[in-house]
Amino acid sequence: MKGKCNVEVVVVGAGLAGLTAAVVAALDGASVVLCDVRALGGRARSHTREGFILNQGPHALYRTGAGAGVLSRLGVDFSGSPPHRAAFGYTEAGSLAVLPTSAGSLLRSSVLGVFDKVRFARLLARVQRLEPASFAKMSAAEWVASLGLSSRGARVISALTRVATYAGDLDLVSGDAAVAQLQLALRGVLYLDGGWQSLVEGLRATATSSRVRVLECEQATELHARADGTFEVRTSARTLQAASVVVAGGSPAAARALLPRPPAWELGAPATAACLDLGLCRLPTTMVAFGLDQPLYLSTHSPKACLAPPGGAVVHVMRYGARISTDDRAQLWELARRCGIGDRDVVVQRFLHEMTVCHALPRPGSGLRGRPSIDATGTDGVFIAGDWVGSVGLLADASIASGEAAGRAASQRAKRQRALGSAMVGP
Ligand SMILES: Cc1cc2nc3c(=O)[nH]c(=O)nc-3n(C[C@H](O)[C@H](O)[C@H](O)COP(=O)(O)OP(=O)(O)OC[C@H]3O[C@@H](n4cnc5c(N)ncnc54)[C@H](O)[C@@H]3O)c2cc1C
């Protein structure tokens, strides 16, 4: 155990939320220590195998989402490309048909009849003008039902909504989140060159240049409030004394384990996924497929993004809502084969049987505004950040937006403590 260390802000957890919080607090002038029980990046880490860069399941950055805005403000550069435009609907019977995802593909699609095509075209024309907040009371499933489509049309919209929200069960996510995500998805997403590791490395570089002290492989085990308004954070290697703490451990459970007082959060259901990540020596015959009868998805991320050696391809296959792993694995392989992927094409493969994509979806009834705020910890000076925190965005957008807000609040609180005369010095 190393000695005591005084610092203004301690950030626990170095996924996108914690990295953002640490960088924002440091750029605001605070001395910052950031610790993670593992390597930096959390669920945004990518792994390189035989020249293929695999994200942990399919990851796309919303071009106009809150996350991209914060990263740009922080000077974190990223590059990438939009997905393949031609998407196919995959039915239980195993057929693949052109899916309407734009005005052009709507005309070509045989998935919808004329009645649905007209309604679908009207929806595409007005979806950007919808006010998401007005759908917070209903579930995404109720919103889809309110569109008055045939059951086939409703299945198509449900498949698109699933891809935009990652919610396997649309009864469990609020309508405002669904509409906001569809608006973002229609404005475009990017598959990132170098994978999401490029965001992690960009944030790491900014953290280093702004003098954040990074402690990798160091778990925060205890957090105590002290009588003078400061906090003691014990890690597996040292004790830190801080004016403010941001807990960005990924899950509500990780936050609960550290918070000095038990929080009273009303949380939605988590969104989980089973993922099959593939590095192939050639492109599949079908690049993008959305399950219509089953919550399935396949997308070819490279060569759109630089993720594979020349001639190769990275393909992500996913089931929204993880179940028994053997069943899910078989179902994902079935879709992969249907899209033209044979055993001999596979150079590397990885099956992630149950990933948590989002720890608590916005609930129908309270919607995005019903999620816990960054200061809903019951302790002044302790803040939370993650994909289940704050009223802004879903998925990584929520993590990064809440990370930014928590980092700023933590550094402001540290400044107030400094003004009150607490003896804080840099690490
Ligand atoms: C399959 C899949 C697909 C996804 N696709 C998309 C997508 O297309 N678009 C999108 O926007 N988002 C997507 N996401 C979501 C996105 O990856 C996450 O929202 C984001 O990475 C979460 O960041 P975070 O910092 O909140 O949490 P995490 O990444 O979970 O980071 C939390 C960190 O805290 C650390 N930690 C926990 N407890 C402690 C402790 N006590 N002490 C020290 N460290 C601790 C953990 O080791 C971890 O590194 C996807 C996620 C998955 C799983």
Image: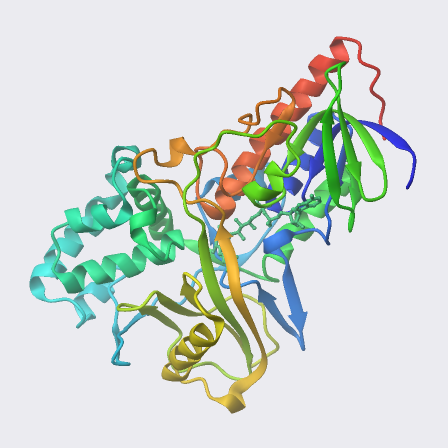
- Report the residue at 44% width, 63% height from top: 322
Quarter of the picture containing the C terminus is top right
**Could you tell me if residue 316 is visible in this image?**
no
The single residue placed furthest to the left in the displayed view is 115
When the figure is inspected, residue 111 is found, relative to residue 197, above or below; the finding is below
Taking the view exactly as shown, the residue that stands out farthest to the front is 262
From this view, report whether residue 363 is shown above or below residue 263.
below
Q: Residue 228: x percent and y percent?
A: 76, 14
Residue sitting at 64 percent across and 26 percent down? Answer: 382
Pinpoint residue 327: horizontal percent, then vertical percent: 43, 75
Is residue 222 visible from the viewing direction of this image? yes
Would residue 290 appear left or right of 271 to someone viewing this image?
left
Q: Is residue 352 left or right of residue 8?
A: left
- Residue for point 74% across, 26% down: 30
Q: Position of residue 245 (x, y in %)?
A: 69, 29
- Residue 121, percent from left and from top: 17, 55
| 425 left or right of 382 in image | right
Name, please, the residue furthest toward the top. Answer: 420
Identify the residue at horizontal 43%, vertical 33% (top origin): 391
Q: Quadrant of the N terminus?
A: top right
Return the residue nearer the eye: 122 or 292. 292
- Given residues 126 and 387, the one toward you in this image is 387
Residue 149 image-quadrant placement: bottom left
Is residue 116 rendered to the left or right of residue 212? Answer: left
Residue 364's place in the image compared with 63, above or below, is above
- Indicate the colouring scheme: rainbow
Residue 402 found in image quarter: top right
